[in-house]
Amino acid sequence: MSILSNRSAMVLFHDDIGHRSQKVRIVIAEKGISCNLEVLTKDDLPKEILEINPDGHLPLLVDRELSLYHSGLIVEYLDERFPHPPLLPVYPVSRAQFRLILQRIEKDWAENLDILENTKSSKPQITKARNDLQKNISNSLAMFDNKKFFRNDEFSVLDAVIIPILLRLDYHQIKIPNNKASKPLFDYIERMQDLPSVKESFTSLEIELL
């Protein structure tokens, strides 16, 4: 039986340890979206999934006739389809500023973590990605302030992107010195771990490993 046939409900195909999958699950939980969650293995995707998602990326969101397999697009789609609570600013200037930060986080943080999570990455690639991610986060400590959420008074898409990355630092042997400069970062991580949507987003494997 096809895993895609007779789907009347939204479904998220995801892996149970990847940071991009957790990002989308956090958004789903934060917005209270009714969505079926189905775990797949990145290295052993069903043929019919590869037919609509040839690059084999996870997560993959299927909403009737729509299939989205870029986590950033999935988050924007969910935010537009389910606008409450909004995860991006309403005003164009503020929204553009958020997107600039997202672009920086994507390039400096997320893409390096992708390499660490990829089972096909070579040892030199892993070493470089680990060093670059540690350096980039250390260079970004000033971005964390005394606001409850990341550069905002309300939960936003930035939090959904950032917290899965930060929660994986120890697992990937990335050490950020615990000092006065890094205290806002560690305080932020502690606050986010207690957030209901973050708690709900964890898979059993993530609870065991992270």
Image (cartoon, grey):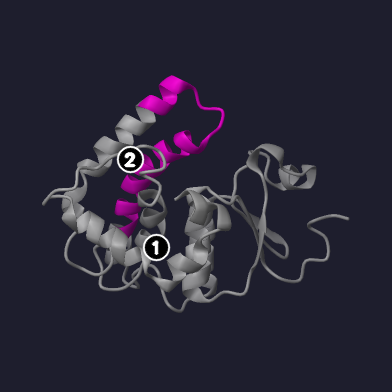
> Which labelled disc corresponds to residue 157?
1
Question: Disc 2 on helix, strand or loop?
Answer: helix
Q: Are marks 2 and 1 in contact (CB under 8 Å)?
A: no
Measured as percent of width and height from the top left, residue 180 is found at 11, 52
Question: Which one is in front, 9 or 165?
Answer: 165
Question: Which one is in front, 143 or 138?
Answer: 138
Q: Quadrant of the N terminus?
A: bottom right
Residue at x-position 43% and y-position 77%: 85
Measured as percent of width and height from the top left, residue 115 is found at 46, 34
Question: Which one is in front, 207 or 16?
Answer: 207
106 part of magenta stretch: yes
Measured as percent of width and height from the top left, residue 159 is found at 36, 61
Name the side, left or right, on which 73 lies relative to 88. Answer: right
Please tell me whether residue 155 is drawn above or below residue 133 in the rendered image: below
Residue at x-position 28% and y-position 37%: 134
Please tell me whether residue 182 is drawn above or below residue 136 in the rendered image: below
Residue at x-position 42% and y-position 28%: 126
Question: Disc 1 on helix, strand or loop?
Answer: helix
Residue at x-position 57% and y-position 74%: 33
Name the side, left or right, on which 140 lies relative to 105. Answer: left
Name the side, left or right, on which 57 lies relative to 129. Answer: right
Amino acid at the residue labelled 2: Asp
Main SS of the magenta segment?
helix
State the separation of the CA atoms marked 2 and 1: 17 Å
Question: Which one is in front, 198 or 6?
Answer: 198
Name the side, left or right, on which 61 lies relative to 197. Answer: right
Amino acid at the residue labelled 1: Val
Measured as percent of width and height from the top left, residue 68 is found at 61, 55
Residue at the extreme front of the image, as rendered: 208
> Which labelled disc corresponds to residue 108?
2
Please state the extent of the stretch shown in magenta in the rendering. 98-127
82 part of magenta stretch: no
